[in-house]
Amino acid sequence: MPFALTDDDVDIHYEVQGDGPPLVLLGGQANNHHWWDGVRPDFAAAFTAVVLDYRGTGDSGKPDTDSYSTRGFADDVLRVLDHLGVDRAHVYGTSMGGRVAQWIAADHPERVDRLVLGCTSPGEPHGVERSADVRRSLAQVDRAASRRALLELMYTPAWIASHDGPFTTLGDPDMPPHARRGHLLASGRHNSWDALPSIGAPTLVVHGTDDVFNPTANAPLIAGRIPGAELHLVPGGRHAYFEEFREVASPLVLEFLSR
């Protein structure tokens, strides 16, 4: 099982699949590399697809420290690339992974070839936050009810009705409480607004039109801040547009990355 060691001595577990130019796939908050299980073969067919477990998730270290931040996660990703001997890669980040990807591209432009930002946000205070109703639905005391609410934020009713799971985008169930809190704080404190105009990598911004978990209005905000960024909205897509609308989203991203 391969690991990269971070500057603060945390082991970051990663996996590599496929052959071709390197592509890093970054998943959502409090999720491990299984976030990409449903679509990773699409990218491994054309690229060397790298997925990882953020610190606090999966088989990576889970320090009980204040080391959780989207910028810190970006540094962890770079340590994985260093361990692989990869100087430059495409980066595709979704949800919190898109926030992490923003820092990689802004702070380390020499490491990024092409950038894809999916269902993500620039963070507060400039981003569009989810509604109070959505927050309440996720904070229900009944864990089954809150899980159902999250499932419905990720996928359409038709998809849920026709798929039995497992659903791999609903969070890492084995995260310790301190790591879960760390991920929540990391995502909540993200603010890349001032850094976005410095991103020079060719960028594609993708979002589902029906995403209320991370409101779709964030997509044009990000695209408008990054010079030359392209924007594509996936009709009917909710937060997990990349999986449910795989037949649209994967070719879209592959075409962009292969130019």
Image (cartoon, grey):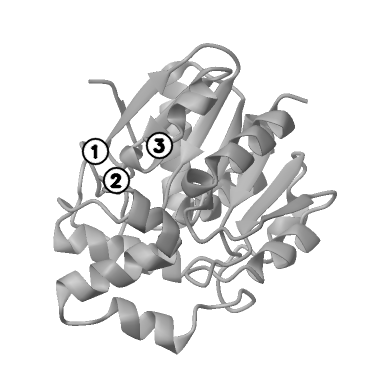
Q: CA distance from mark 1 to mark 2?
A: 5 Å
Crowd rating for badge 3 (residues with CA inside 10 Å; few <14, some 14–19, many 20+): some
Q: CA distance from mark 3 to mark 1?
A: 21 Å
In the image, taking residue 214 as reference, residue 227 lies left or right, namely right
Image spot of residue 58 (x, y percent): 23, 41
Q: Which residue corresponds to the image point at 52% horizontal and 27% vertical from the top-left?
A: 42
Residue pointed to by mark 1 = 60
Image spot of residue 41 (x, y percent): 45, 25
Label pair 3/1, CB-CB below 8 angstroms: no
Q: Which residue corresponds to the image point at 15% horizontal and 50% vertical from the top-left?
A: 174
Residue pointed to by mark 2 = 55
In the image, taking residue 193 as reference, residue 45 lies left or right, namely left
Q: The residue under label 1 is which amino acid type?
A: Ser
Callout in the foreground (2, 3): 3
In the image, taking residue 105 as reference, residue 166 lies left or right, namely left
Label pair 2/3, CB-CB below 8 angstroms: no
In the image, taking residue 76 as reference, residue 106 lies left or right, namely right
Image spot of residue 154 (x, y percent): 42, 60
Q: Which residue corresponds to the image point at 65% horizontal and 58% vertical from the top-left?
A: 235
Secondary structure under tag 2 reads loop
Extreme right residue here? Answer: 228
Q: Which residue corresponds to the image point at 72% horizontal and 67% vertical from the top-left?
A: 221
Residue pointed to by mark 3 = 38
Secondary structure under tag 1 reads loop
Instruction: Tell me the quarter of the picture where residue 11 sits.
Output: top left
Q: The residue under label 3 is which amino acid type?
A: Gly
Label pair 1/2, CB-CB below 8 angstroms: yes
Q: Is residue 1 visible?
A: yes
Q: Earlier in the sequence, mark 3 or mark 1?
A: 3
